[in-house]
Image (cartoon, helix red, strand yellow):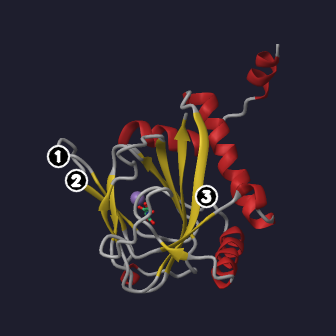
Amino acid sequence: MSHLFEAIDFEENPIYEQIIADIGKQQYSIVEGFFAQEEVHLLRQMLQQRHEEDAFKKAAIGNRVNELIVKSIRGDLILWMDETNANSTEKLFFNKVNDLIAYLNRTCFLGILSKEFHYAIYPEGTFYKRHIDTFQNDDRRKLSFVCYLNEDGWLPENGGELVLYFDENRREVEKVIYPFPGRIVIFESQIIEHEVRPVKTERLSITGWLKTR
Ligand code: OGA
Ligand code: MN
């Protein structure tokens, strides 16, 4: 019975449909203005506030159990977000993410059961070498989600491009993506190798994963 109501209530969302189509076709999707200018502003303030609270620690390679500081691979500072203790700005973020997850689960049967997100600051001169987002002992990460919180007017000269790499039987060998504010990038965690090129101006973002099982 409830299924009937769901079918009737279901409203197609063109942005989500675009994401689904893009991922099906090319394993990644870029959406401009997924977060409005004002939302980006609030999230950036939130990131800076958390940073000032000195909650940041050096980003670690590996999962939270086996943490290792390897600055030659990545130099970003991260802070895991806690949905249960989210303030109003972070709730706004999670509401949008949860809405997307609900849509994906309803339309694609992806079976996203959990998620994890962190704030990230790349200080000047830092980078994240080419890598894949799944761990050897844990392949639950299905989709990677990155949202950029830089100031308006971020310039290509500032560096910090996200570069996605594809295998050779594709026409496109790589995709260079600038971290413009409000933009999100979603890609298949188990397939897409990628890197963050050296940043010349502090680069701010939220990165996370939609996970199965
Ligand atoms: C990561 C990552 C990409 C980006 O944190 O694993 O690849 O554009 N981030 O920040
Ligand atoms: Mn990554």
> Label 1 belongs to which residue?
168
Which three-letter amino acid code belongs to the residue tagged 3?
A: Phe
Q: Quadrant of the N terminus?
A: top right
Q: Residue at x 72, y 56 (%)?
A: 83
Q: Is mark 1 within 8 Å of ligand 2?
A: no
Q: Nearer the viewer, residue 77 or 196?
A: 77
Q: Tag 2, which secondary structure?
A: loop
- Residue drawn where x is 44% and y is 43% of the image: 22
Q: Is residue 98 above or below residue 56?
A: above
Q: What residue did someone put label 3 on?
A: 34
In primary-sequence order, the first of circles 2 and 3 is 3
At horizontal 35% and vertical 72% (from top left) the residue drawn is: 70
Can you identify the residue that label 2 sits on? 173
Report if the CB atoms under discs 2 and 1 are less than 8 Å apart: yes
Badge 2 vs badge 3, beta-carbon distance below 8 Å:
no
Q: CA distance from mark 3 to mark 1?
A: 31 Å
Amino acid, disc 2: Val
Dot label at residue 142:
none
Q: Picture coordinates of residue 169 (x, y %)?
A: 18, 41
**Residue 18, can we see it?**
no
Q: Which image quarter has ligand 2?
A: bottom left
**Left or right of 16: which side holds 4?**
right
Identity of the residue furthest to the front in this view:
65
